[in-house]
Image (cartoon, rainbow, N blue to C red):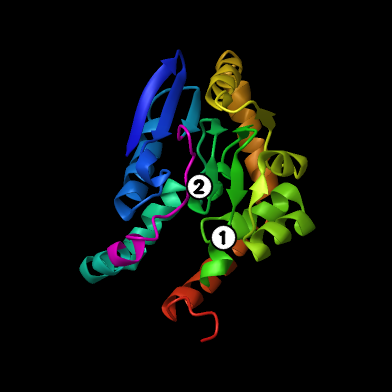
Amino acid sequence: MIETSRPLPGVIQVTLHRPERRNALTVAGFRELAAAWHEVAGSGARVCVVTGGADFSSGADLASFADDLRAAAGREGGREVWAAVHAAVLRDTDLAVPVVAAVEGFCMGAGMELVGATDVRIAGESAVFALPEVTHGFIAGGGSVARLPRQIGYAAAMQVLLTGARFSAVEMRDRGFVSEVVPDGTALARALEVAGQIAANDPRAVAAVKRVVAETMRGSLADAHAAETREFRALTERGGDPSA
């Protein structure tokens, strides 16, 4: 369900392609996406565009994910699965290649967590964003609990994280999560245009910008990730029952 292509010189594109499920990610899908980022890192491309077509991603495929996780845990333990999930959404990865997200339709759960790890975010005007994990007794354990307050501010982030509500592209642009809102169906074209602009710049300068911003933003992010992991594991170990 994950495809890579070379739409422009210096640009590699990662496409989530499972339209019948709004690009919901199974365990196998997370593994494919993690492998795609390894390909991007070694591709020599100057910029990456990540997209999903009519929908970016509705997140983890809840219809199969729990069963897949239990099956994987029986074989090699759950840690390998969560490592793949975290790699897929770029939770613990400092990717040197700038990533531009082209978002249409649903961008929820793991999909929004992935977008939160990208550098430039172009959204169609009807795109919908949400981190609904709290409504299922979990937290957004792919980096958002640690990262989102740093990106859009405490109060705005807490509303997203604590309510699990849906937000429009314009609302997320106003909060600083989305870079641009464009007419529906044009997010990819605009993302490729921006990617072309970045690819035309001195790659040493682009890499320097990414390094400095990453170091500046990180601060105590490792501690925040550790706390996020602790709480996520505490919830999953009791089966996600918020009353347990």
Of 185 and 239, nearer the camera is 185
Name the residue beneath numbered marker 1: 132
Name the residue beneath numbered marker 2: 111
Give the amino acid at mark 1. Answer: Pro
Instruction: Let me know if residue 61 is in the magenta part.
Output: yes
229 over 171 or under it: above or below: below
- Give residue 52's position: percent from left, percent from top: 45, 35
Judged from the image, the secondary structure of the residue bearing numbered disc 1 is: helix
Examine the rendering and report whether any part of residue 58 can be seen.
Answer: yes
Residue 194, image quadrant: top right
Is most of the magenta stretch helix, strand or loop? Answer: loop
Of 71 and 223, nearer the camera is 71
Q: Please identify, in this view, whether the residue under mark 1 or under mark 2 is nearer the observer.
A: 1
227 over 212 or under it: above or below: below
Residue positioned 61% across, 35% down in the render: 119
Give the amino acid at mark 2. Answer: Gly
235 over 19 or under it: above or below: below
- Give residue 67's position: percent from left, percent from top: 29, 66
Of 57 and 70, nearer the camera is 57
- Give residue 218's position: percent from left, percent from top: 65, 50
102 over 147 or under it: above or below: above
Residue 1, image quadrant: top left
Residue positioned 49% across, 77% down in the render: 234
Q: CA distance from mark 1 to mark 2?
A: 11 Å
Horizontally, residue 62 falls left or right of residue 177, namely: left
Examine the rendering and report whether any part of residue 92 can be seen.
Answer: no
Q: Which residues are magenta?
A: 52-68
The crowding category of the residue bearing disc 2, from other C-alpha atoms within 10 Å (few below 14, some 14 to 19, many at least 20), is many
